Image: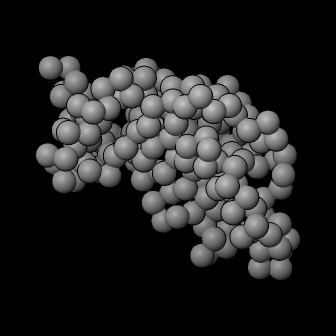
Amino acid sequence: MRDWRDVIQRWVARESRIASLTRQKVEFCAWTISPPSSDQWPSYLPGCEALQDFYRFCDGGYFNWFNWPSLSQLVEMNRKWFELLRDWDKRGDVLLAGQHVVIAEDGGGCPVVWHVTTDRVRAFQFDGGDWEAPLGFSVDEFLTTIFNPEERPEPDWWSLFLQWLDGQLAE
């Protein structure tokens, strides 16, 4: 099982090599990772150990159809989604300050939200108007699942990418 913290640290350390490898295989070009910045976690956004670790090891990136903003973009991303989902479809506010943190956007552009109280991570399907099934029962579980996808008879691009990259980096 891959430890997401170790993987992210290895990817950041070898980012230029991985980037050149991904350019050789067009199906893997949707991958980026940024080295950690000196920015601090925004004081008015709730945080957790897994998010603190994530941003200590990298400053966002794009992997497994999720766009993780840099810390400098995190506040703006939250502001945008809190505004867009205010009084959503006459049901009231979807996101509540102090309870929700938008941590990423999925491949369809939907917000991926960590709920502080339940610790669950879910996407809100704004074009359909409802919450998706949990992506993880904690941020740590969500990240662990991203880096350890289920084995399937027909693996998706992300599973193939992880296997391929494991082999490339072992050389």
Q: Give residue 68's position: percent from left, percent from top.
A: 52, 46
Nearer-the-camera pick, 55 or 132: 55
Q: Nearer the viewer, residue 151 or 125?
A: 125
> Residue 113: where, in percent of width, then height?
66, 51
Residue 44 left/right relative to 5: right
Q: Residue furthest bottom?
A: 90
Q: Residue at x 55, y 43 (%)?
A: 70
Q: Residue visible at 77% across and 42% down?
A: 45
In the displayed structure, 126 sits above or below 29; it is below
How many numbered marks does the figure carry? 0
State the residue at coordinates (67%, 68%).
130
Left or right: residue 117 compared with residue 80? right
- Above or below: residue 151 compared with residue 97: above
Q: Is residue 96 visible?
A: yes
Q: Which quarter shows the N terminus?
A: top left
Q: The C terminus is located in which quarter?
A: top left
Residue 152 appears in the rendering: no
Q: Is residue 61 left or right of residue 127?
A: left
Q: How is the image coloured?
A: one colour
Residue at 77% across, 74% down: 88
For residue 4, above or below residue 160: above
Front-most of 117 and 57?
57
Please, is residue 25 above or below residue 132 in the view? above
